Image (spheres, rainbow, N blue to C red):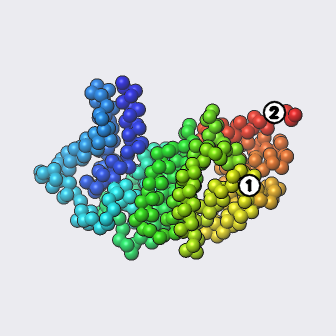
Amino acid sequence: MICDAMSTVEHVFRQERGRVLASLMRRFGDLGLAEDVLQEACRKALELWPRTGIPDNPAAWLSSVARNAGLDQVRRAGKSISDAEAVLSSLPAAMIQETHAIEDDRLRLLFICCHPALAPEAQVALALRTLCGLSTAEIARAFGLAEAALSQRLLRAKRKIAEARIPFELPRTQDWPQRLAQVLQVIYLVFSEGYCASGGDTLLRADLCAEALRLGRLLDALQPGRPEVQGLLALMLLQASRGPARLSPEGYLLTLEEQDRRLWQSDLIAEGLAVLEVALPTRAPGPYQLQAAIAALHAKAAAASQTDWRQISALYGALLRHKPEPLILLNAVIACAMAHGAEHGLAWLARLETVPSLAQSHYLHAARADLLRRHGDRPGALAAYARAAMLAANAVERQYLLRRHGEMRLPLV
C-alpha cells in the first residue's frame, strides 16, 4: 500500500503539478508560497494515503490540502480575515480582473515564467520547473549547469516575481509580440524534453509532449493567424507522430532510417500538415515554420530512401540564417552528408570540433560515427561510437550507441 501511495503521489505530481500549481498561484499570487504548500500537500499524502486509501480524485485532494495550508500561512502572517478575503487580499487588483475570454491557469503561469522582467535563462528553467515538474537536477543537466547554480537561478526568479508583483494574467494585445518568442521557445523546450529526455532511463515522456501540444493548440486558438505559432504547433505534431515507432519492442532506440513508418500516427501527420499549409502562404518564414517544413518532408516520405535530402539541406541553410546555433549547424551538416555524400559531412564535422558546446556533446560524436560507418571507416566509427556512448546522459541513447558499437565489432561476412 505504501508503494501504491508513493507511486500515485509521484504520478499526480508529474501529471497535475502545473495545473494545481497554477491554480494556487491564481489564489495566492505568490509562486514561492504556492510551491511550498503543494510540496506540503504531497508530504501529507505520503503520510495519510497508505492508511486511509487513495482518494477518488488525488489531484483535487492535493489541491484542497495545499489551498488550506496556504490560507493558514496567510493567517499566520497576521491577517485575521475570512478565507475569501484572505485569498482576494493577497492579490493585486490586476490579478482579479479577467482580461481575456480564455480561462487557462497554466497558460497564465507560462506567461509569468516568460515575463520580460526575468532573465531569459531563468524564464526557461522556471517554466520547466513549475509547469512540467522537472527536478532541479534534470533542468541543470539539460542546461549543463551545476545543480546549486540552477537552484539559485530559480530562487532569484521567484523573488523577482514576488517583488515586482507580476500579475497572474495574459498580456495585453499590444504586448504579445515581444512576449511570444520566449513563450514559443519554452513550449518547444518542454516538448523536446518529452520527445528525447536529456537524462534518465527513459527516452520519451509523454506527459511533457502532451502538455506542450496542449499549450501550442491553446496559443493558436488565442492568437490565430500567427505563422510562427502555427509553425511550432505543426512541428510538434509532426515530430510527435513518430512516437510509437521510435523504440523497438525490446525498448531499443530506432533512428528515422530504422523506424517502421506504418506505426507513425497518420492523424497527427494530417493535422500537422494542415496547420503548416495555413502558415506557409503568409510568406513570413521563421525558424519554427522552417523546422516544420523539414519534418513535413520526412513525414511525406513513404520510405527512408525516398527522403528529399537535397530539399532538407536547403531548408537547413535557410534555418541557419534565423538560428545560427550549434545543434542546428550539426543537423545541417548531417543533411548535407545525406544529400551529397558522407565525405562532405565529415569535412564539415572536423570544423565543428572547435565549438565548445559540441565538442563534449554525444550528438557530434554520434554523427561522426554514423558518417564514418557510411564512409567505410570501421576503426574510426568504433572510436566515435564509444566516445558518444561515454558522453550520452540518457540510458536509451547510450544503449543505442553501444549497440551500434557492438554491431561494428562483429566480423565482416
42 is higher (above) or lower (below) than 165: above
Task: Tell me the number on the disc at residue 410.
Answer: 2
106 and 69: which one is in front? 106
Residue 34 screen position, x and y as percent: 31, 49
- Residue at the image position 37 percent from the left and 36 percent from the top: 9
Counting other residues with Cα less than 10 Å from the Cα at mark 1, is it few (<14), some (14-19), or many (20 or more)? Answer: few
Could you tell me which secondary element the residue under label 1 belongs to?
helix
Is residue 306 visible in the rendered structure shown here?
Answer: yes
- Residue at the image position 53 percent from the left and 57 percent from the top: 271
Which of marks 2 and 1 precedes in the sequence? 1
| Screen quadrant of the C terminus | top right
Residue 342 screen position, x and y as percent: 80, 54
User: Image check: 74 left or right of 156?
Assistant: left
Could you tell me which secondary element the residue under label 2 belongs to?
loop
Counting other residues with Cα less than 10 Å from the Cα at mark 2, is it few (<14), some (14-19), or many (20 or more)? Answer: few
Is residue 164 visible in the rendered structure shown here?
Answer: no
Residue 140 screen position, x and y as percent: 51, 48
Instruction: Please state which of the two labelled residues, at mark 1 or mark 2, is closer to the viewer.
Output: 1
User: Image check: 277 left or right of 68?
Assistant: right
273 and 62: which one is in front? 273
Amino acid type at circle 1 is: Gln
| Residue sitting at the far right | 413
Amino acid type at circle 2 is: Leu
- Residue at the image position 29 percent from the left and 51 percent from the top: 24
408 and 247: which one is in front? 247
Displayed quadrant of residue 405: top right
Q: CA distance from mark 1 to mark 2?
A: 29 Å
80 and 82: which one is in front? 82
Q: Which residue is mark 1?
A: 306
